[in-house]
Amino acid sequence: MPATAETYSLGLPIEISKIDQGLKKLWQESESTATRASLVNLAVYSEAADSLSKNTQLMAKITESHACRAIVIEADCKASENRVEAWISAHCHVSSVGSKQVCSEQISFLLKGACTTLLPSIVFSHLDSDLPFYVWWQEELREPVHPQLWAWVDRLIYDSQPWEDFREQMRLLESAEQEANQRIVLCDLNWTRLDSFRFALAQFFDHPASHHNLAKINHVRIDFAPDFRSTAVLFAGWLAAQLNWQSEKTEAANRLRFGNSSGGKIDVELRERTGEPIGEVAVETPQVEFLVTHASGDLLEVSRGKPGEKRMPQLMPAGKNDPVSLMSEELMRGGPHHVYLHAVDRVRDLL
Amino acid sequence: MNLVTEQPEPNPLREGLSARAVPQPCTIVIFGATGDLTHRKLVPALYNLAADGDLPPAVVIVGFARRPKTDDEFRHDLEESTRQFSRQAVRDEIWKNFAQSIFYHQSEFGDESGYTALAKRLDEIDKNHGTRGNRLFYFAASPEQFEPILKNLKAAGLNQTCQGSWARVIVEKPFGTDLSSARELNRVIRNSFSEEQTYRIDHFLGKETAQNILVLRFANAIFAPLWNTHYIDQVQITAAETLGVGTRAGYYEDAGALRDMVQNHLLQLLCLTAMEPPTDLSADSIRDEKVKVVRSLRHWSRNEIAANVVRAQYSKGAINGEPVIGYRQEKNVNPDSQTDTFVALRLFIDDWRWADVPIYMRVGKRLPKSATEISIHFKKAPAVLFNKDLRDLNVLVIRIQPDEGISLRIHAKVPGTSFRIEPVKMDFHYGTSFGKPSPEAYERLLLDAMSGDATLFARRDEVEEAWDFIDPIEEAWHAKSDAPELFFYPAGSWGPEAADDLLARDGRAWRRL
């Protein structure tokens, strides 16, 4: 390939009207035995300066495990001039079977000026046909949303962790979802961040004999890193939604209170600690504590027992908090995220 | 394929987290723990499940074997082999944690007291490790040991469980050597464990593409109307390997290719290819349909066997340019051996869907390349317009191994002013499209057994029906008079000419792999 991976350049500059021809030529000129692969269209949208280069690096990593047509967009909405620049490139890697080079195409756009109107037309004309369309939206949403665009999106991926106003952002997302006739699956990377902790905690209750403990939970402690309070609140929302807890009035921001269906109270203590986004979760009943701790590296340590009792911890994968790992995790999943939406509903006002 | 018969009330925290049945805490007791299968496949598979977070934390492995060994020595041996055979690199901290749950239990298979001690040990493990009385007994020992093991497990009460827990047994092939021995084995198993507790493992069914056959057929409406005698001309199933008998001569001399491969793996692939849609995805619904296929296989008379089944043995030749010896010259092989290392069959499924569609099967050692594939050859389009001179058919190929994937051969016009038509291939490779490598078959199957999902395991009647089909062929081959000829083929060739003739008589040829 003339423009291959490992160099994170944007590739060949090209006129918008000649992108298809350019891509064709890119493959024809391939001297190696490269295979083009694509399972989805993945558009990445950012308004940060120099995001094209940063996102190209991310796509080079993501395409190693998720073949896609990447459409990377940097928008400068405040620019006075109306201009679009484009580049084409390919990310290649050796496939997991054999020595075959597998390549994903990337089309990069720099949009200046009236990007709200340009965006749908740019994206629509460069989708790989018949493949699902995922959008990774790296900005906060603002009015007006792109009704035309949302109608085409299958999965909208975003990260709610840095959001200033969660409720407003969710309102905009839900209106986008309505525009799309509820077709969009909302995928929050802040939720993905919780996967390994949710998985580790859930496994304690797989055996029917341990189900009774769920009704006895009276205290939950969630340790979170600075800036990751929303992640911890989402975790509490998940427990509340799945265990049918109702939120009750709380006096302190980091002490949440819920009531269960039999009138029991559950205190959720949120503790800020340096370290991983979620450092530890302790779920307690009067008899037993279920503990999930971020151990060294990328492992979780899970154990159960009475306070002070000797435990036999087990290790589980912890997942990683970098954007490539979170995106890869998210792209592996399919189906709707009902559980996420239920969790959000329980704690919307607390976020 | 994840419906589980024993599924209790679901864990609400699991919702949306995994799309498969959840494996339960348990103790896995491996009989034949010092053998190859344990070291090369089972423990590496369990380690990979642990490293990927798919194994419940409370899983304990107890190796049961005759050789004296301490827990630590056993762990050390397993660590070495897992480092060698695991699909992912072994991480020290994960291995250390995983190895804490591995124990060794030394006993003769026929020694009743060894099982009484095992029962005590398992109770202690339940108490200390939270394995909740669930037991998975894996028979990785040789088949002649199955009976004493089963008898002693029963005597020690290990086939029974307390309420809310389970005991299951995984049996490795061969499931007998003929119908009567299979029935006897099933009887012996049934004396100790019910059919619901019995998991007969066929690792071919754990392969991603084998599972994908059902998805391809029943999740894609385009194939359903074509999948029958009206549109399919023939089906070919090939399982070829470049390897010779290697160190397995002791077993292989008695088994041969027909028993070793056709009775189980190839007939299972045929069942998935030919079965009717199941009523649902539960284990028994799928297996009900599979067994109907085997039951509908046309049985041959002794004369017909010679005309429809070819057996052969490799003689010296070359593989990838390297000279190799013939089967009879292999270590531990009888110099006059009559064992089949190659079989080609012409089969018919006498049911409504497959009437008159020949199924050609071939399996062999020391063939030019290693590949397991199923190919569906569609009938020719009417011989008018473009099709007057076309020789090639549309072919849908399901590649089981290696390079798992699916391809479809269609006809296309060669660019130019003339109407030249050539076959082209649309090709899907798992490895190219999905970056994540598939789990090993044993990983999937062990997890299924821990979850109580028997879909990918063979049921008693499937095994017995398969032997009922195979037995007359073996009997004809071993008849004192008029036994069909044993052909020879040079190593590195695609088998004897007689195998080609089998198809040539029908005006067909083996697909070029």
Image: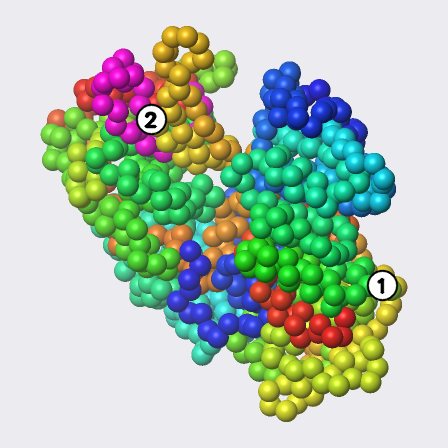
Query: Per the image, is B372 magenta?
Result: yes
**Placement of the N terminus of chain A among the 4 image quadrants:** top right
Instruction: Give the residue pinned by disc 1.
Output: A227
Labels 2 and 1 share a subunit: no
Output the chain of dot 2: B
Task: Using the image, determine if residue A225 lies above or below residue B231.
Answer: below
Furthest-bottom residue in this view: A263
Q: Is residue B417 in view from this perspective? A: yes
Give B329 or B465, whichever is nearer the viewer: B465
Q: Position of residue B207 (x, y in %)?
A: 46, 43
Density class for disc 1 (Cα within 10 Å; few <14, some 14-19, many ≥20) is few
Q: Position of residue A314 (x, y in %)?
A: 69, 64
Q: Residue at x 68, y 73 (%)?
A: A237
- Seen in the picture, residue B329 relative to A323 is either above or below; the reply is above
**Amino acid tagged 2:** Asn
Q: Quadrant of residue A24?
A: top right
**How dense is the environment of label 2, judged by Cα within 10 Å: few (below 14), some, or many (20 and up)?**
many
Q: Tell me the residue at 72%/46% (across/down).
A: A116
Q: Which percent across, then down, holds residue A26?
A: 65, 21
A330 shown above or below A340: above
Q: Which residue is mark 2?
A: B394
Q: Which residues are magenta?
A: B368-394
Q: Quadrant of residue B437?
A: top right
